[in-house]
Amino acid sequence: MRVAMGDSILGGVAIGPLRFYRRRKNTLAEVSSDLTAAEEWDRFEQAREKSLEQLSALYEKALEQVGETDAAIFEIHQVMLGDENYLDSVRSILETQGVTAERAAAVTGDNLAAVFADMDDSYMKARSADVQDISRRVVNNLIGAGEEDLPWEEPSILVAEDLTPSETVRMDRSRLLGFITHHGSAHSHAAILARTMNIPALVGVEVDERWEGHLAVLDGHNGCVYVDPAPELLEAMAARQQGDRKRDSLLSGLKRKPNVTLDGASVEICANIGSIGDVGLALENDAGGIGLLRSEFLYLDAAEAPSESEQFAVYRRVAETLAGKKVVIRTLDVGADKQAACFPSEHEANPALGMRGIRFCLEHRDIFKEQLRAILRASAYGTVAVMFPMVTSVREVRDAKEVLEECREELLQRGTVLGEIEVGIMVETPAAALIAEELAPEVDFFSLGTNDLTQYVLAIDRQNPKLAPFYNAQHAAVMQLIRLTVEAGHRHGCWVGICGDLGADPTLAEAFLRMGVDELSVPPAAVLPLRQKIRGMDLSQKKG
């Protein structure tokens, strides 16, 4: 038995023969064309138009398989095919080198892909595969090569150097048990599609050509592939696979079911998301909305802060995709363990107690206002709420609301259409919990950030692994502050949610429902298991 490790894209088990997918190689000689540069450009334009038609068809197929959010990859590919830098490069090569259109398209694709591959940002680095994908499509259309398919009939685990988004969507799911790639990353569009399509997958695996045809187990739970597994391991992994299927089947049956206990108590279950790619996971797991959109993902790896327009495009897309379900956008929360390269940071002796959350935003109002304008504009396209993090005083809330109102007036003067928007705060400091009675009249909702709340209540750095034995998220002091916050919020008409890790803890679900918590916002994968737990509860029965 041989074992190889990789990065897991999706927890799950696949068992079957390994089959290598070898992409057709197009050999394009660097020879002069018999046609003029203008004639070669016409050939390129015809191939580009055909490519756009194919991408439109792929979008429609992906729409059925993975939903609107992830299908948008192929809309992005269509935009890339019209990018001026791409077109200018092809035209320049044709005019200065006198080569064929396929050669110019291939060289342009290679050059731009190399530019992306050399970037430090992991997300941008992963775009290299997208550039190669569209370039290969144009070249294939120029030389008359058809679309490739899986060259085997029996269901198998695919092994490849890498996969493009179009290859991932196009493959016959009845013949694809899972896939393993040598290159690629968890940030690639192919990986995003694999997660949404529920295909067990590993990337970054040192693959061996000699594996061809051998029986293997792909263990997405532990990031391993076992080639020629021992009988006892094979039996154990088959049992785990069966357990996964049974669990998924049971959970799938809970979709569209209410989060109601046996005695009629209900709670909303929403999803926490930290990237645009997580929206599909939230929908697939039937979340009631987005209880926490961590907006800092737009900033953390960016060389420059995203513009108002860039942010608006993302927030609008999420709001439209959620189709009326609530989207709670937390304003920028950088500092402490979340340092953004686009903002110069000064050394702080205690960064967890430093310039972060609402403090940072109120100190950098130009940045804050750009984000608030983007959020307000998105409110016209769905049900949007804004939430301020790291609040410790009524003054901070009032200041933030004043800035929000300034932004609203600016947009109305521009003639911008705006929707209604709820305003809330994160209760994640002991100060906020203890003055919840004063804060509640200022806002529409509270969302308890139990991760930081626990850290500050217990005076324990949650990033320090040496302190793990002392970290107790269910400490009586933490639970008491949660209870006080819920009660204070309800007295003033605020709904109260929990968006920290405690919200996904099934052992605490009953306690939170008894407190009267209105919403639990959890990782997408925790939505259905939590629903299952809640539907089996009976709060009318006395505890213990």
Image (cartoon, rainbow, N blue to C red):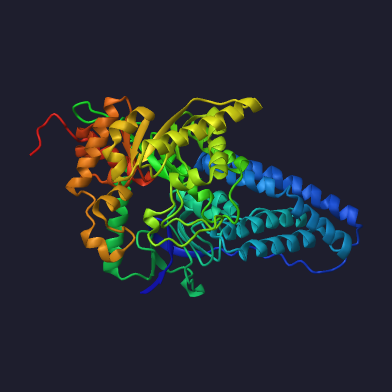
Q: Residue at x 38, y 29 (%)?
A: 442
User: What residue is drawn where x is 80% and y is 57%?
Assistant: 90
Towards the viewer: 90 or 136: 90
The relative height of residue 177 versus residue 442 in the rendered view (above or below) is below
Quadrant (top left/top right/bottom left/bottom right) for the N terminus: bottom left
Where 201 sits versus 298, above or below? Answer: below
Q: How many marks?
A: 0
Residue 416 location, x and y as percent? 62, 27
Give residue 402's position: percent from left, percent from top. Answer: 49, 32
Question: In the picture, residue 325 is in which quadrant?
Answer: top left
Say whether residue 79 is left or right of residue 266. right
Asked which quadrant contains residue 395, the reply is top left
In this view of the protein, can residue 193 be seen by the observer?
no
Residue 135 or residue 296, whichever sits in front:
296
Is residue 111 something one can see in this rendering?
Answer: yes
| Outermost residue toward the front in this view | 395
Q: Where residue 213 appears, x then y in whole percent?
A: 46, 68
Q: Nearer the viewer, residue 536 or 140?
A: 536
Residue 182, position as x, y percentages in the image: 51, 67
Where does the C terminus fall, quadrant-wise? Answer: top left
Left or right of 75, for residue 232: left
Q: Residue sitting at 69 percent across and 60 percent down?
A: 112
| 407 relative position to 264: left or right | right
**Which quadrant holds residue 8?**
bottom left
